Image (tube, rainbow, N blue to C red):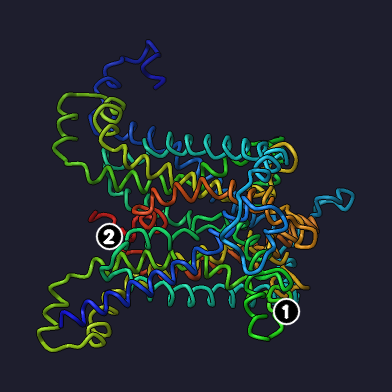
Amino acid sequence: MAEVTTPTVRPQPAARKTMAQRSTAERRLFLSPALILVGLVTQVAFLVTIYYSMLSWNLVRPDLGIHFVGLSNYASLLSSSAFLTALINTIFLTVGVLVAGMVIGLLLALLLNRPFPLRPLVRTLLITPFFVMPVATAEIWKNMLLNPVYGLISWLIQQTGITPPDVLGSQPLLGIGIMLTWEWFPFFMLILLGGLQSLPEDLIEAAHIDGAGPWAVFRYITIPHLQRYIAVSTLFGLIYLLGVFGEIFVGTQGGPGDASTTLPFLIYRTAFSNWDVGTAAALGVIAVLITILIATGFNRILLRMTGYAEAQ
Amino acid sequence: MKVRLRLGTTVAALVAYIVTILIVFPIVWMALTSFKDEVSAYQMPPSLAFTPILDNLNDALNSGIMTYIYHSVVAVGVSTIVALALGIPAAFALVWHARKSNEGILFWLISTKFMPAVGVLIPLYVIFKDIHLLDTLWALIIVYAAVNLPLVVWIMYSFFSDIPKDLLEAGRVDGASDWQVLSRIILPISLPGVAVAALLSVIFSWNEFLFAVTFTYTSAPTVPVFVSSFLTSEGLFWARMSMALSLAIVVPVLLGWTAQRQLIRGLTLGAVKG
């Protein structure tokens, strides 16, 4: 750029830049603002998280100072029962909701794949829970449905003569899991429905002509065809579910005790109740490592996805 | 055979209707409760026949929810505009000046979507604190724009890729500049894509809670922060709470219904069309 305005340099070379060079510059001009913002907020911030994870730093105790402590935050986490509890809770909750959401989603997708009156309306209503604000979902379930004294589900249980349990108090992970399943099954349902609808009909017809019953069609045609969709929904479901926070914040505050504290909630508590930046950052790094582990496990699918996007 | 088929359809329809009623019941009940008085709100079984009142709407509006709604509208609106303003040119550049590095860039954008919020939460908090953006809407605008950008780029990229190549070549031959091609040829025929990207971006940031509750206190809290602050069940007013919840969820639910066809493409960043 400077060459153009400096009189000692002839302007011609700049003006005669080849088309390719110019389009490369334009490409950069259009692309870089987006890539820089995303890069700063996700990648650079994460590098800072790694750096913070090696500090001893309490935000509300400036008198203690900030010290470099190497990996000792990680070392103390590995022997901390709060961390292990949170890790186990996170795995239980994520896998439980994934399986329950997938099964319910698959059954409803199979149902929605059949023609019946008002099908578009049913489909629209069924996906509604997914759009409800997660903290609102938790308020509805905690107060109006699961409350042991006033809740509707408790009332229904009472009608059968059983004393309704305080689900969020005695089985908090189960209670949170039920809320999350209600919220997330539409996600799996929609992906699997997309898969079912892309199944060529003549394939099924041909199987019928060959004498295959409905179960054989499901087992040998539908399920193999759905594999890709199941894999994609598992990957994205796991990633999104690992980040669940608002439902726990409102539903149980991670309690009673640590009983429903998951990794995100433990990070929040460590950072914004204990103000322990180093430990919270180390937990953040561990959360990212778990995510990377899952994503790498699905590496082949991801590559196929990229190929799919190119083909679009 | 025909009889069996019709019977199957009837059974499928019945099962579908019953399941649907059960699933949406909590939402419908909440919406109805917002128009009840506090006594009938607690009535079991919940009555569907009642005289609707608007007192709760008055109470909700006077409880300060409007301030939170205003914060949400600004944070969500501005961040969506920023995400579109940066994301659309980026997606255009990927299609218009296609390079081998496209695949890498798109893949990288997906991978940033996998970054858990807790992996960047603490440095962002510290940085916003240092530059005095904590407890301002700017903190949320910056984060929401960045979080929604990969989604916008992917959706717009997939829409732009569907545009016939001849149309693009026509613009190239005319010697139009990139901005002209984008604003006069590409954008007008891609408005449905822009709408989808905007809708999804609005839904996700309207419902976002973790950043909202950590980055704002008194000057910029959004609707989810308001919803999360209801008292525990003892002494809670269901009717009033229901009205506030109804106001909080109505926008994303309506937008979600509108965008449902494109939802899965957005959530899986183009992996599945849905």
Q: Quadrant of the N terminus of chain B?
A: bottom left
Q: Tell me the kind of residue under disc 2.
A: Gly
| Front disc: 2 or 1 | 1
Vertical placement of B185 versus A89: above or below? above
Residue at the spot 65% in from the left edge and 64% down from the top edge: A144
Out of A311 and B184, give the one closest to the viewer: B184
Residue to which mark 2 is pinned: A307
Question: Which chain hosts label 1?
Answer: A
Q: Residue at x 31, y 35 (%)?
A: A24
Residue underneath mark 1: A170
Q: CA distance from mark 2 to mark 1?
A: 47 Å
> Helix, strand or loop at disc 1?
helix
Callout 2: few (<14), some (14-19), or many (20+) C-alpha neighbours within 10 Å?
few
Q: At which x and y percent is residue A115?
A: 25, 68
Does any portion of residue B127 appear in the rendered image? no
A2 sits to left or right of B143: left
Q: Among all residues in the image, which is located at the extreme right?
A: A63
Q: Residue B55 falls in which quadrant of the image?
A: top right
**Which amino acid type is marked by label 1?**
Ser
In the image, taking residue A266 as reference, residue A181 lies left or right, namely left
Which residue is nearer to you in this view: A96 or B228? Answer: B228
Q: Position of residue A37 (x, y in %)?
A: 51, 41
**Can you say which quadrant of the picture contains the C terminus of chain B?**
bottom left
